[in-house]
Amino acid sequence: MTKKFYSYEEFIKDIEILNSKLANSDIVAIVGLARGGLTFAHFLSEKLNIRELYSVQAISYNGEHKLAQIKISNLPDLSHLAKGKILLVDDISDSGRTLTEVNRLFSEKYINLEIITATLFLGEKSTFEPTFWLHKNSDWIIFFWSYE
């Protein structure tokens, strides 16, 4: 598998692109999928000035090895939000399994809110296409926030 480094400079450019697409989108909360979506979610919340920032634990990989079962825990309580959009954020939709499951859980739990999704990368074999994504990809991405 080819590995590609994704730099801080590329990331900042992508945040600007997504900011222009997401501004005025009626987003009331951002939820980052831990761990890959946390840095991304934090930067978006700063850029979009959205203080309702949460995380959910979603584990689908052990290193470069895909787990048979996705482990999801710590869904935030967003019941105080009456209407608007929740933005689920992850670094990549590789197979699509994680975002499919997290999207399903949020859609079932918060029927009064619209769930939208954003990733930096969309894997060529992903079964889930995020609402917003920036780069189609078949490489293993090494993010600047990762230790390798």
Image (cartoon, helix red, strand yellow):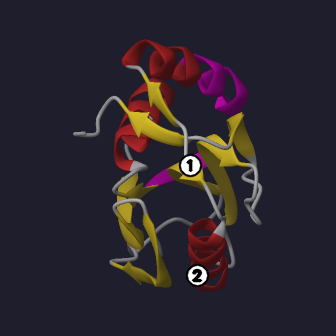
Q: Which amino acid type is shown beneath numbered disc 2?
A: Leu
**Magenta segment: does it hold 18?**
yes
Q: Is residue 123 above or below residue 66?
A: above
| Quadrant holding the C terminus | top left
CA gap, disc 1 to disc 2? 19 Å
- Point out the residue furthest to the front here: 1
Q: Nearer the viewer, mark 1 or mark 2?
A: 1
Up the image or down, 110 lies above or below 144; here it is below
Q: Mark 2 highlights which residue?
A: 105
Name the residue carrying label 1: 92
Looking at the rendered structure, the kind of residue marked 1 is: Ile
* First-in-chain label (1 vs 2): 1
Q: Residue at x 39, y 35 (%)?
A: 143
Q: Where does the magenta region start and end?
A: 16-31
Q: Which residue occupies 66% across, 65% down?
A: 96
- Classify residue 58 by image quadrant: bottom left
